[in-house]
Structure formats: C-alpha cells, structure tokens
Image (cartoon, helix red, strand yellow):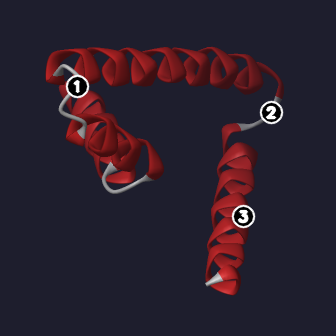
C-alpha cells in the first residue's frame, strides 16, 4: 500500500470532519459530567468506523457500475447544493 494514499485519505477525512455536526455532537456529550470521557470517545469513534465501513462498501459497489469521474461530479454538485441551501437558510 502506498503511504501517500493513506495520508491523502486521512488528511481529507480529518479536515472534512473538523467542526461538523458529528464533532459538535461528540463535544456536547463530552461536556456532560455524567458521561465517561472514554465511553464518549469509544462510542463516537466506533460510530465513525461503522459509517466509514458503510461508505467503503457502498463506494466499492457503486464503483463497479458508475465511473469514478461521474461519482466525483455527483458528489461535487451535491456539496454545492448543500452549501447554497445552508447559506439560503441562514
């Protein structure tokens, strides 16, 4: 395995996740004194691993039927639409 691929994926996902709803929800759970910090970490990390596994399985399946370039366009357009919708709702 090429380590550059690992670090490209790691960096992309890390920066995409910073400050998103998932991180904010985890932050809020960690502020509750009744919640074990380790349990918050373990539960949120497990959820991210599980959702990433789903994304890999779905991506692998879609990649067999749809060109990766087309998937990139669909994802890009989706992000733009969500961004416009977010700005419009503000």
* Horizontal side of residue 84 vs 36, given as left or right: right
Q: Is residue 13 above or below residue 52?
A: below
Q: Give the position of the C terminus as an image quadrant.
A: bottom right
Residue tagged by mark 3? 77
| Inter-mark Cα distance, 2 to 1 | 47 Å
Q: Residue at x 32, y 21 (%)?
A: 45
User: Which class describes the residues within 10 Å of circle 2: few (<14), some (14-19), or many (20+)?
Assistant: few
Q: Residue at x 63, y 62 (%)?
A: 79
Which is more N-terminal, label 2 or label 3? Answer: 2
Residue tagged by mark 1? 34
Residue 21 image offset from top left, x and y in percent: 46, 50
Q: Which mark is residue 66?
A: 2
| Inter-mark Cα distance, 3 to 1 | 42 Å
Depth check, front residue: 30 or 79 = 30
Q: Is residue 79 above or below residue 61?
A: below
> Residue 64 occupies which quadrant of the picture?
top right
């Amino acid at each position: 395995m090429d380590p550059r691929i690992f670090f490209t994926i790691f960096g992309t996902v890390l920066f995409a996740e910073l400050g998103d709803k998932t991180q904010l929800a985890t932050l809020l759970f960690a502020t509750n004194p009744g919640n074990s910090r380790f349990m918050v970490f373990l539960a949120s990390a497990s959820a991210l691993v599980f959702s990433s596994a789903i994304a890999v399985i779905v991506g692998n399946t879609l990649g067999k039927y749809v060109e990766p370039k087309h998937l990139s366009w669909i994802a890009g357009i989706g992000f733009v639409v969500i961004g416009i919708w977010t700005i419009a709702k503000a």
